């Protein structure tokens, strides 16, 4: 069990972030044990051919049998808008001593592929990760990011409606919060209690963890990676449903969109889920927003839509 202790000031400074490199590193878990990540099996199928050409020896050396990855693959993101190019640039500048130490923290030793000149090892790792990103991640990252951003919007809504403690206690079964202590069952030997020491905690949603994850080394900045909501909608087209009497008023597609917007989503994501064009979805969303049934907010490069209180009442999901 890992426990992060926070005072009121640090608790108020808690923030969210998205890290493309963190997502790339954690995805090695799905390569390692596909059965543990059933929601990502479509991604594994879609990338099967591309993965025949990646540097498997390098990627395999970046994860162990416990599904641990070195901390340099899990950087603390500065914001929800972090770019993979910036993270690769920082990784390229890693101190070789830190590179070797963090590999040893995971494996107990430096894997054979990274033995020898650490500068050449870092260069090969970067080539392997960049190729893996370009062939297996870049084509899907836009939609992945939308789901991660929607999760953060949902957590913000939870804080506004129920408070920070309620949001923290809803991050996952392996995490709990009480009296200034965030506890994460990280399945590592022994208990650790770490003060956040004025650094605050960064919460990072991810598609590739089933429980709370944290840095391996104690001196890394406090960070918790947790399972993002809405992953089930990532790969499967969702048929438009029937919202009973509402369908007769709004039409089948608009009623289905209104039903789906119990959680934030972008027009691109909705188009993929419902099998219609993004431009058509945007037309429907503009009409729903014009009569106050949905709201919208800009998040980074995306516009996320959410059913309004009036929309809740129309579908009889509100309290009115």
Image: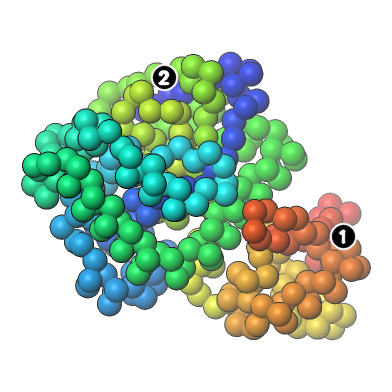
Q: Which residue in the protein does label 2 denote? A: 194
Query: Which mark, by number, is residue 310?
Result: 1
Q: Nearer the viewer, mark 2 or mark 1?
A: 2
Q: Nearer the viewer, residue 226 or 169?
A: 226
Q: Is residue 317 left or right of residue 144?
A: right
Picture quadrant of residue 161: top right
Looking at the figure, which quarter contains the N terminus? top left
Q: Nearer the viewer, residue 11 or 17?
A: 17
Check whether the beta carbons of the residues at disc 2 and disc 1 lie within 8 A of each other.
no
* Local crowd size for mark 1, using a 10 Å CA cut-off: few (<14), some (14–19), many (≥20): some
Is residue 243 visible in this depiction of the protein?
no
In the image, residue 95 above or below residue 317: above
How many numbered discs, if any? 2
- The local secondary structure at tag 2 comes to strand
Q: Residue at x 85, y 74 (%)?
A: 287
Q: Residue at x 12, y 36 (%)?
A: 109
Q: Position of residue 243 (x, y in %)?
A: 75, 76
Picture quadrant of residue 15: top right
Picture quadrant of residue 239: bottom right
Looking at the figure, which quarter contains the C terminus? bottom right
Q: Residue furthest right?
A: 291
Q: Is residue 205 left or right of residue 294?
A: left
Q: Position of residue 279 (x, y in %)?
A: 71, 80
Q: Position of residue 312 (x, y in %)?
A: 81, 60
Query: Which mark, by number, is residue 92?
Result: none
Quote the CA–CA distance across marks 2 and 1: 45 Å
- The local secondary structure at tag 1 comes to helix
* Local crowd size for mark 2, using a 10 Å CA cut-off: few (<14), some (14–19), many (≥20): some
């Amino acid at each position: 069990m890992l426990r992060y202790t926070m005072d009121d000031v640090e608790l108020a400074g808690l923030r969210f972030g998205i890290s493309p490199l963190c997502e790339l590193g954690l995805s090695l878990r799905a390569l390692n044990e596909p059965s543990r990540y059933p929601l990502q099996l479509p991604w594994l199928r879609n990338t099967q051919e591309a993965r025949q050409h990646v540097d498997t020896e390098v990627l395999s050396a970046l994860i162990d049998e416990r599904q641990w990855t070195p901390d340099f693959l899990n950087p603390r993101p500065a914001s929800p808008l972090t770019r993979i190019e910036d993270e690769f640039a920082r990784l390229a500048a890693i101190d070789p001593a830190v590179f070797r130490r963090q590999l040893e923290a995971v494996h107990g030793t430096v894997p054979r592929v990274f033995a020898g000149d650490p500068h050449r090892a870092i260069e090969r790792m970067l080539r392997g990760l960049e190729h893996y990103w370009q062939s297996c991640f870049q084509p899907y990252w836009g939609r992945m990011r939308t789901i991660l951003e929607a999760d953060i919007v949902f957590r913000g809504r939870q804080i506004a409606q129920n408070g920070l403690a309620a949001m923290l206690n809803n991050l996952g079964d392996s995490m709990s919060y009480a009296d200034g202590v965030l506890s994460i069952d990280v399945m590592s030997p022994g208990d650790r209690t770490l003060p956040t020491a004025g650094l605050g905690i960064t919460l990072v949603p991810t598609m590739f963890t089933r429980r709370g994850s944290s840095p391996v080394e104690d001196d890394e900045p406090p960070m918790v990676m947790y399972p993002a909501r809405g992953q089930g909608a990532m790969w499967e087209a969702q048929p438009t449903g029937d919202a009973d009497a509402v369908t007769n008023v709004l039409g089948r597609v608009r009623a289905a969109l209104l039903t789906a917007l119990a959680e934030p989503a972008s027009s691109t994501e909705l188009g993929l889920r419902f099998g219609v064009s993004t431009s058509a979805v945007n037309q429907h969303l503009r009409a729903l927003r014009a009569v106050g049934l949905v709201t919208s907010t800009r998040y980074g490069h995306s516009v996320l839509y959410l059913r309004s209180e009036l929309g809740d009442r129309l579908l009889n999901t509100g309290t009115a």
